[in-house]
Image: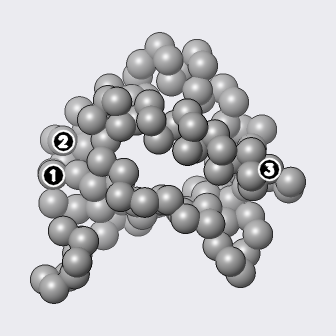
Amino acid sequence: MFFELREYRMMPGQKQNWVDYMEDVIIPFQVSKGMVILGSFVSRDEDDLYIWIRRFENDEHKEALYSAVYESDTWKNEIGPKIPEMMDRSKIVVRRIEASPKSVIQ
């Protein structure tokens, strides 16, 4: 099992729009396709930073879920096209992390 910690930077003035879009559209859609979303966060110190964490059983599980989400017509035609106006895709940071043995998140 591993986790993806994803860090995004919002376009100026788009933080609340992005949070609303994530919570109302993106996260529910991804969960409906089988994604496990452990949490989403905004920075108290950096006004444009948004972070979220997803969990995967293994690489095959990740690839299957990526395909189900990102190759879907809904993502390509409805969800994805709205993202660039809110988020700077050139600044995305994705970290693949594993829980330490005594972590409460497993």
Instruction: Tell me, yes or no, whether the two marked residues, 1 and 2, touch with CB atoms within 8 Å.
Output: yes
Query: Which residue corresponds to the image point at 66% horizontal and 26% vertical from the top-left?
Result: 81
Query: Which residue corresponds to the image point at 40% horizontal and 22% vertical from the top-left?
Result: 71
**Quadrant of image for the C terminus:** bottom left
- For numbered disc 1, what is the local secondary structure? loop
Disc 2 to disc 3, how far (Cα)? 32 Å
Q: Which mark is residue 14?
A: 3
- For numbered disc 3, what is the local secondary structure? loop
Query: Which residue corresponds to the image point at 55% horizontal and 65% vertical from the top-left?
Result: 41
Residue identified by numbered label 1? 57
> Which amino acid, mark 1?
Glu
> Which amino acid, mark 2?
His
Q: Residues within 10 Å of mark 3 (few under 14, many from 20)?
A: some
Q: Residues within 10 Å of mark 1 (few under 14, many from 20)?
A: few
> Which amino acid, mark 3?
Gln
Query: Which residue corresponds to the image point at 15% horizontal and 51% vertical from the top-left?
Result: 58
Residue identified by numbered label 2? 61
Q: Name the spot of residue 70 as percent of width and height, x first.
A: 43, 29
Disc 3 to disc 1, how far (Cα)? 33 Å
Q: Earlier in the sequence, mark 3 or mark 1?
A: 3
**Quadrant of image for the N terminus:** bottom left
By what rule are the colours in the image chosen?
Answer: one colour
Q: Name the spot of residue 102 as percent of width and height, x first.
A: 16, 85
Q: Which mark is residue 92?
A: none
Q: Name the spot of residue 57 as percent of width and height, x first.
A: 15, 52
Residue 55, located in which quarter of the rendered image?
bottom left
Disc 1 to disc 2, how far (Cα)? 6 Å
- For numbered disc 2, what is the local secondary structure? helix
Q: Is residue 35 above or below residue 2?
A: above
